[in-house]
Image (cartoon, helix red, strand yellow):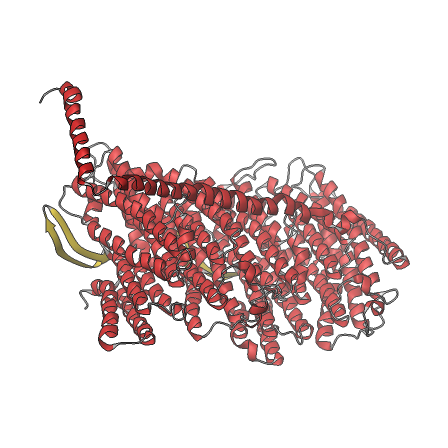
Amino acid sequence: MKEHLLSWLTFAPTAGALLLLFARVLMGAREETIRRLALALSLVPLGLCVPLLLRFDPMASGPQMVERVPWIRFFGFNVDYFVGVDGLSLWFVVLSALLVTISILASWRAIDQHVLAFHVFLLLLETGLIGVFVALDLFLFFIFWEVMLVPMYFLIGIWGYERRVYAAVKFIIYTMVGSALMLAAIISLYYLNGGTTFDIPAITENVRAGRLVLDPATERWLFWGFALAFLIKVPLFPFHTWLPDAHVEAPTAGSVILAGVLLKMGGYGLLRFNLPLFPQATEEFAGLLCGLAILSIIYGALVSMVQPDLKKLIAYSSVSHMGFVVLGIMARTEMGLQGAIFQMLSHGISTGALFIIVGVLSERRHTRWIAEFGGLARPMPVFSALFGILALASVALPTLSGFVGEFLVLVGTYTSELAHARAYTVLAATAMIFSAAYMLWTLERVLFGEITREENRHLPDVNGRERLTLIPLAVLVIVMGVLPNPILRRTDRAILELKQAVRGAVLVQSEPLGRRAPNPALFGSAAREQAESMRRR
Amino acid sequence: MLKALVLSPLIAAGILGIFGRRWSERLIAAIGCGSVGFSMLLAFRLFFGDLWPRPPEQRVIWEPFFSWIASGPLRVDWGFQLDALSGVYILFVTFVGFWIHVFAVGYMRGDPGYARFFAYMNLFMFMMLVLVLADNFLVMFVGWEGVGLCSYLLIGHYFDRAYAASAAKKAFIVNRIGDFGFALGIILIFATFGTLRFSEVMGTIAARFPEPEALGEIGLLTTIALLLFVGATGKSAQIPLYVWLPDAMAGPTPVSALIHAATMVTAGVYMVARCSDLYARSLTALFVIAVIGGMTALLAATIGLAQWNIKKVLAYSTISQLGYMFLACGAGAFSAAIFHVVTHAFFKALLFLGAGSVIVALHHEEDMRRMGGLKRAMPLTYGTMLCGWLAIAGLPPFAGFFSKDEILWRTWTSPVLPEPWGRLLWAIGWATALLTAAYMTRLIVLTFEGEERFARSAEGHALVPRESPPVMTIPLLVLAVLSVSGGWVGISEAYTGGRIANEFEQFVRPALARVPVHSDHLAIAEFGHGMELGLAAVTALAVLATLIWARRFYRRDPLRPAPRLLENKYYVDEIYEALLVRPIVRGSTVLLWRVFDVAIIDGAVNGVASAVAAGAAVLRRLQTGLVRSYIVMILIGALIVLGYFVFVGSQFPAR
């Protein structure tokens, strides 16, 4: 188990899904048993995250806990089963494992039909989620990317609300359009790189060292092939319209996973592929993407503000928050990149929890319309306190997780070499005002004021199980806001190398032939130490 | 010790927030007041035992805590720093804070949210201490937004009243507009100096920017200074962001006294003083601050003259007094600003608590039209309120006289304000002083003198107001003593003919910057002590005359109607609503959401989808399953291919 930690992590949920099937077929387990068993099984990958974090070496370069086996050898097609983690992917693996467990807890009462199938899909989904983050072979990555779509499609389509089928189809078509382009780009890249390997670190190193030089037109095509798939996932304006529908129609667990993990794959993909593989195209389109990111931030916040449906409001707020992620990535400074990763983790937890909050309300009242509520702080004090903390994390109050990510992105953007860095920073910072406006207005309408509907007067407060789902997330939001360093430190090395890869590749390719040895002075560590020592003085 | 001082209220807040709901009021009060009292003792011990005995230039105590954010070149640590400026602040914040907590024990008696109230009050004390003791901009921002959060929570204490919830939200959002500027200022500071530590920024600023930026020049320092000041206009309720403070009176009165009068709202002044090295290098920023401060002082005082709600009068009075403080900052007299912060904390807290005592006695009546004649029933409250009244009006030897006079004199002689703005702003400040005397007299007369108007308005049973219990009157007495004597620590040297220096100024001076002196401007020394005393005498006499006249005027007809424009606060709220709030909400609903998002983008997506579906439906017809039709298709296809080769293909060159 020690050598195959990542494989165990990835496939434990699949094994769990099979076990659930056996439990039903062979032993005739009832629904309550299935739920308990699924919860227990989801704790296995979550528990495996402990050795994962313990064994992860923050100072080591490149992927760790690597496993590699030849897998497909077919007409010059060399696909390996190649997995590993580095600072970019580590926390997303943990986030996936955590949110699946939380989702199972959150669905305890909400899912009362096809209970077995629901949990089987959820566990299969987890394999896809973790697989995407640990895959180091392009083809394997693509397979996990597609694997994860299928359970998600069913989660929305079967257990969703009224317009679930429309939303599920919309979700899958949007994503498939992106995937198709990405597949074409992956295969082209494979042959351009010599047609021998899908090994992501190797291809990245080839690009960095100048052994794989793409002509600008090809680079642009490949850049967009990858980028579109990721930007749809993020989702960046104007590719975002699948998101409100998917969220609103999905069951709570679906929304949690969707907001918590799926959107992050977009950001992760940009970090893993677009930046290091196509540095010049990134440079070329950074302005455009930053512009779209700013639009997402402001537009998402304004549209969010006027939503009458609580779930849709939170869905649109995701568009706004994820805009920060793209902005930070495109800034390509250490603070911007690290801020983007932190923002994704923070958003995964706080927004995931906010969807559970909506779930708690809609289980009680079977409506998500804000106008139906009001004055809930009286009958539901604990619920209100949790809602308040999570909403304020979303508003990026300092000492809560949202602040760290957004502040790092803003500083990182301002200090970047982007052409209009200042304008981007100022425009993005307006989110401080708009997010306060939509979140606090929501709190006011849902929690405060007089109780306008008789039904709300005696709503039960969150019960033990709901507390078990929400309190850990609320605590995490506070801990991440006060002590972000344990997370940041484990991404330091990967971010530094990513930044060097981006920088180095641009330099190598723009310099004349023969002078391709990377200039050490421009490479972080030396300059960094120098700056460090100057500051100490 | 700094850590214990800061963390004590936080720990109490956590305990009360989690367990307090089941506890008795007595226990909650003990913990709530105890933690703040503990901080107060530590503050006094640190100040008099450690800071005071040191030589002036070594009065800095620095305690690092732990690393907060480390990313790339950014290093931010939790660290606390005590110097003369923050020393003064922790003294009065914990002292006034403690007595307001004690008052609240009585004021909040029987409130269902007793534990929640004290938890939030303690959390506020923690955040305020973080703000004051922070050793870098980002930790200060934590306190800055943290006090805003507590303000939000406490304004909304009576959350089931719609107006309270709405006022809380308004306070937070308006403050966020200010914080938007503040955050950008912080980012710009980091980009410029590569650090956020106060000592490092202020320590290198003189070397990096030796010359101050001239008036009208918008350079880097001016940009930073003005961005930070945007934050101050939000937190300290200045034009154009003052609109939240009057609404904030929806919170319980101790909250108004603590947060919205004595401590939090002066955070903007503190920030400007903390960054005085920066502000001293931008004459533009100083000028803007002085003008905004002066205008706010005057505008708020005129509105205060026409309000009927006793707390709203005090709220506008606070805005006006904060304007004075910024006027002083803008004139380059940072120590005078801080001095007024301290005296104002005493007398304004006193006035609010006195108002609270009245409000409780009248069963939560806040409208002065239904008060009157209370001096007989509430002699202690009346007597202490009189001290506050004379202190804010600025009659010697009450506290407000010395601090306000210092500000007026420093404005008159300001070396940084261009001609003739020093004297113009002095005139505005002078007029405001008279208005202050007038509206405060109106408040005292309407509340305590004349006939009792409350008995008539109470339906059914008659109201019999009683003096408040000792737990509320003792804080009043303590604050009354300080409202009388609090100003004596900063008596200008002019009164002793230069023999005894202004002790307050001497103490805080090492922590503050000295502003550059214009070469074309008269030096302060040339004005001399005679003129300072002369102006002070003129002001004091004018204030006295106003007090006497206003008392007669309002006693004759206490309920005389006020000008509608003033009563409606110049319609500023309505203007903001019509020009900003409504267009944004309507635009977002109709234009962005319904039209753009749903109709255009999603319409396009669905359009493509249905086009594909329609296309597929047409193509499906071809798959008839009839062999004959397939044969026809094959034939047509073959003909096309053949035709292509015959007519087009032949033109291609052969291989």
- Residue A500 visible: no
- Give the percent coordinates (x, y) of residue B528: 75, 46
- Give the percent coordinates (x, y) of residue B145: 54, 57
For the C terminus of chain B, the quadrant is top left
Specify whether B285 is left or right of B357. left
- Give the percent coordinates (x, y) of residue B269: 62, 53
Q: Which residue is drawn at 34% across and 41% down?
A: B614
- Give the percent coordinates (x, y) of residue B542: 84, 51
Q: In this view, does B466 lie above or below A349?
A: below
For residue A294, which quarter of the picture?
Answer: top left
For residue A238, which quarter of the picture?
Answer: top left
Q: Which residue is drawn at 77% across and 49% down?
A: B566
Q: In this view, does A332 lie above or below B151?
A: above
- Residue B584 visible: yes
Nearer to us in this view, B467 or A175: A175
Specify whether A163 is left or right of A197. right
Specify whether B21 is left or right of A268. right
Nearer to us in this view, A2 or B499: A2
Nearer to us in this view, B390 or A510: A510
Q: How many labels does the image show?
A: 0
